[in-house]
Amino acid sequence: MRDTVGIVRNTHASGQADRPLHGRRFLMLQGPFGPFYKLLAARLESLGAHVIKVNLNGCDLHGWGLRGSILYRGTLDGWSRWLEDMIEREEISDLIMHSDCQKYHCAAARVGKQQGLQVHVTEQGYLRPHWVTFEQGGVNANSSMYEALDDVRRFPAHIAARRHEVEATGKPTQAYVLRTIRANFMLYLAAPLFPGYKNAFSYPVLKQAGGHVRRAFRNRFGKTNQRNLDTLRDMIAEGSTKYFMALLQCPGDSQIYKHSPFADLGEFCERVIESFAQNADDDAVLVFKRHPLDHDLDDHRARIDDAARKAGILDRMLYIDGGVLGQFVPRAEGVATINSTAGLASVDMGCPTICLGKALYDADGLTHQGELDEFWVSPTKPNRDLVERFMGYLLTKTQVIGDYATERGMELALTGITQRLVSGCKTAQVLVLDQHRQQDDQAMPAKDEPLIAVPVSV
């Protein structure tokens, strides 16, 4: 392991060195399952900030507890007005929330921007594992990256190498699942404290848990899925069959119904099948890959089979559950997605990718910009140079090393997020310097700019 040094442009160099967040007043809403936001609040307070936490449900109590928080017991209809009063009364300067698409946070982001607050959003990493997302203004389809394509095209391509400079933190998925189970147990246990809370999930949590158990049982003891996986691997080994992939998202994902023309996942599948059947070569195969967190309650598999049967391509369609993207995507002729972060991984692997919804990486030179019907015949490959510049810009502006579940991962994420808040999230630019690599002039900070050295373990 070696240490490199990141350089952050410091917009607060004239402030108090030991209390650089003095005068900032943070309002924290729902965070990732577990204690991450409570730990983040302690960091911010140690740097001079004042922090107020609002708990909306029992999941919040699991991570924070009752002490030192405010319970919002009202309804969703009264949430925006209550929040406006809170912001004005407490003179809030910054708002922090995890994800910005669930109804409470969507309203909070709107109120915060109207009130002139700095709105910061955390989310799972655009690049996984070992990264988390921290953006000002919004994430995914609400990201400011949409306005920065000109900056992306000028960004030093070599900085994208930083995505490989990560520190293994254990098993974040396993740790996060355990925290999720405990948090949702508290959701039920503490429900009487939050009479007005409206659950954002399409299905009750216990019903989802039952669906996951059923899915695991089918994959463990059933034969159909393993047969489909073996068929795809044989196709790859032989190299004679062309195939396209459709990457499915988690049913109920807000990115589907908020940022795409589809009402649900099944509608996306039907559109893809119809277009593929009418336009792809007769010997091409269409592979649907299920999302790892699919709760098995929405029967989109039946809709896929029905649509494929009607279109006459049932014998040229595979549905797989499991496997690693890196095994399948590089050999595919192309990948279709709504706006999944897995689509970004496909772009990074050099596979032609089309987004049928709004995605922050859906841009000329990165994804196929033509119609879906054209995609099966002449898919557009990503421009490698632009991909590297985009990945470097994405990491610099939105990604922080770490995770929200393991002890080491949380420590890394807390350090990275705190540094971005101190340096000024809006103008901070982390530049990793490699002494063995010649630097691009535009990657270096101006001579008269004060700097903060940021250690990055790799």
Image (spheres, rainbow, N blue to C red):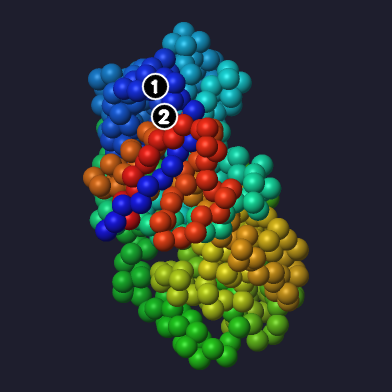
Q: Can you give x and y, in whole percent of width and height, for residue 212 in the image?
A: 36, 57
Tell me the kind of residue under disc 2. Val
Residue at the far front: name it.
447
Tell me the kind of residue under disc 1. Leu
- Seen in the picture, residue 85 relative to 345 is either above or below; the reply is above
Q: Can you give x and y, in whole percent of width and height, for residue 162 in the image?
A: 44, 56
With 150 as the anchor, is 199 left or right in this view? left
User: In this figure, which residue is indicated by the disc labeled 2?
Assistant: 422
* Pick the front one: 287 or 457: 457
User: In this figure, which residue is indicated by the disc labeled 1?
Assistant: 21
* Pick the front one: 352 or 20: 20
- Identify the residue shown where x is 51% and y is 55%: 439
Q: Can you give x and y, in whole percent of width and height, for residue 223 in the image?
A: 38, 79
Q: Is residue 133 visible?
A: no
- Identify the residue shown where x is 56% and y is 58%: 157
Q: Secondary structure at mark 1?
A: loop
Q: Can you give x and y, in whole percent of width and height, for residue 239 in the image?
A: 54, 89
Q: Secondary structure at mark 2?
A: helix
- Seen in the picture, residue 244 relative to 363 is either above or below; the reply is below
Corner quadrant of residue 26:
top left
